[in-house]
Amino acid sequence: MAMLIIPKSKDVTIPASWKELKGLFKKCDKDGDGQLDKRELKEALKYLGAILPGWRAARCLRHADADGDGFVSEHELDELVRYAIKLGYTVKQTERKSMFQR
Ligand SMILES: [Ca+2]
Ligand SMILES: [Ca+2]
């Protein structure tokens, strides 16, 4: 049985950064349509401290948007998180706080 499918929130083997990143991406879905467009992705990457969030958003979109509709949907989100982790992005304490204050 494959172990590496979609992590459940209760699974303790998931790194904290995974859940945090996923939570952050979900929060950045401002219009609440359940998927991230490039602008929302850019906002998320800004929080993560990307130097060129616009450019990075395009890269992330190209990487995670499997069906090529220009949005990162719920099931594509895991790939996005995987990519963000690979790039070394983490949700820092201060950024996390400022998100909840909004
Ligand atoms: Ca959206
Ligand atoms: Ca898509």
Image (tube, helix red, strand yellow):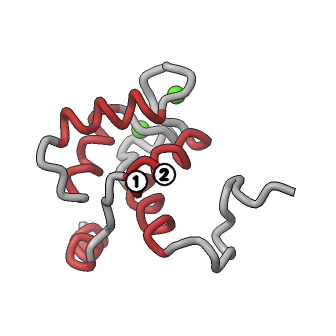
Amino acid found under the numbered disc labelled 1: Lys
Identify the secondary structure beneath mark 2: helix
Residue at the spot 29% in from the left edge and 51% down from the top edge: 44
Quadrant hosting residue 63: top left
Dot 2: within a 10 Å radius of its alpha carbon, few (fewer than 14), some, or many (20 or more) residues? some
Q: Amino acid at mark 2?
A: Arg
Relative horizontal placement of residue 100, taking residue 65 as reference (left or right): left
Closest to the observer, 57 or 2: 2
Q: Residue lying at the far right in this picture: please name it.
A: 1
Disc 2: which residue: 82
Query: Please, is residue 93 above or below residue 17 in the view?
Result: below
Q: Position of residue 56 (x, y in %)?
A: 24, 38
CA distance for labels 2 and 1: 6 Å
Q: Position of residue 34 (x, y in %)?
A: 52, 42
- Label 1 residue SS: helix
Q: How many marks?
A: 2
**92 lies left or right of 26:** left
Foreground residue among 36 and 21: 21
| Label disc, if present, on residue 8 of the rendered structure | none
- Out of 88 and 100, give the one closest to the viewer: 88
**Quarter of the image that includes the C terminus:** bottom left
Residue of label 1: 86
**In the rendered structure, are the residues bearing label 2 and label 1 in contact, judged by CB atoms less than 8 Å apart?**
yes
Q: Residue at 31% across / 59% down in the picture? A: 89
Residue at left 32%, top 59%?
A: 88
Q: Which residue shows up at 42% across the image and 23% down it? A: 70
Residue 74, percent across and down?
57, 43
Could you classify mark 1 by the number of other residues whose Cα lies within 10 Å: few (under 14), some (14-19), or many (20 or more)?
Answer: few
